[in-house]
Amino acid sequence: MKKIIYLIASIAIFSSCKHQTTQIVTDSGNPTDTTHDPIVIPPSNDSVCFNIQILPLVMASCAQAGCHDATSRVEDLNLTSYAGIKAMGTNTLITYITKTTGKVMPPKPQPRMDTASINLIKRWIKEGAKNRICNQTSCDTSNVLYSTHITPIINTYCKGCHNSGNKGGGISLDNYSDVKTQTLTGNLICSIANKGCKFMPQGGSILSTCNIRKIQIWASKNCPQ
């Protein structure tokens, strides 16, 4: 009888811990909508990781040079760390990234955070805004495409500084054509791999080996969409 009870308990625990798959959707909510960039939505039964999901989003949109980076510290805010974001206050953060008029973050003419990113930050706050650190244990480099693999990386780490309204270094990464051009010239890989070019993301940590590898493979395949 004890063995049967233990077996049932084990099955229940396994079922409750089983991870759901990551989804790729668009900001419009329709996964087949090609007019919107795809967004990575982490499994709903996984806790949000601060270091690889929240910090890159905040830094790309809010902690740029001249704003809330470690050097500029506008309004004495340094949003390049967990401590800095917590010091600002999560309610204040949500207020500014969701506002559409008046004082907003990021400031115009930079693009607003997409709905999926805002919802991810809200979910992080609902879970207690914890400093949960995660390591990437797997790297999917099979059939690397712009729509499913590259766009989420660019949106999270690069687009805050390199968009049509704020061309950092004169470079926009707003669309497939822009990203492909910078990739095939070698500029993008040189920057993210810190191989002698101006390091990107500026003020942030180097991209994971997995993300760099995805972009390298994408480039070697002539940047399929």
Image (cartoon, rainbow, N blue to C red):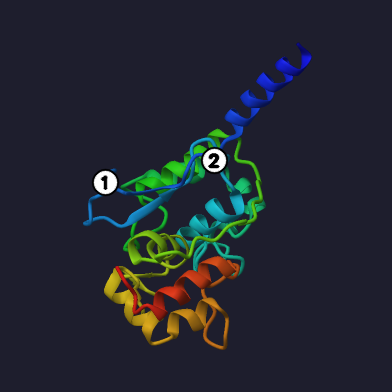
The residue at 54%/51% (across/down) is 54
Whether pointer 2 and pointer 1 mark residues with C-beta atoms closer than 8 Å, the reply is no
The residue at 55%/57% (across/down) is 75
Seen from the viewer's position, the closer of residues 27 and 104 is 27
The residue at 50%/46% (across/down) is 93
Farthest top residue?
1
Q: Is residue 201 visible?
A: no
The amino acid type found where label 1 is placed reads: Ser
Q: Alpha-carbon neighbours of circle 2 within 10 Å: few (<14), some, or many (≥20)?
A: many
Seen from the viewer's position, the closer of residues 119 and 38 is 38
Label 2 or label 1, whichever lies nearer to me, is: 1
Residue 166 occupies which quadrant of the picture? bottom left
Report which residue position mark 2 lands on: 124
Seen from the viewer's position, the closer of residues 184 and 13 is 13
- Quarter containing the C terminus: bottom left
User: x, y (%) of residue 125?
Assistant: 55, 38
Q: Alpha-carbon neighbours of circle 1 within 10 Å: few (<14), some, or many (≥20)?
A: some
The residue at 58%/66% (across/down) is 208
Q: How many numbered marks appear?
A: 2
User: x, y (%) of residue 45?
Assistant: 53, 35
Farthest right residue?
2
- Image side of residue 27 versus residue 59, left or right: left
Q: Which circle's residue, 2 or 1, is located before the other in the chain?
A: 1
Provide the secondary structure element on which disc 2 rests. helix
Seen from the viewer's position, the closer of residues 27 and 77 is 27
Q: CA distance from mark 2 to mark 1?
A: 21 Å
User: x, y (%) of residue 129?
Assistant: 60, 40
Identify whether 75 is placed above or below 192. above
Q: Is residue 87 visible?
A: yes
Provide the secondary structure element on which disc 1 rests. loop
The amino acid type found where label 2 is placed reads: Trp
Report which residue position mark 1 lands on: 28
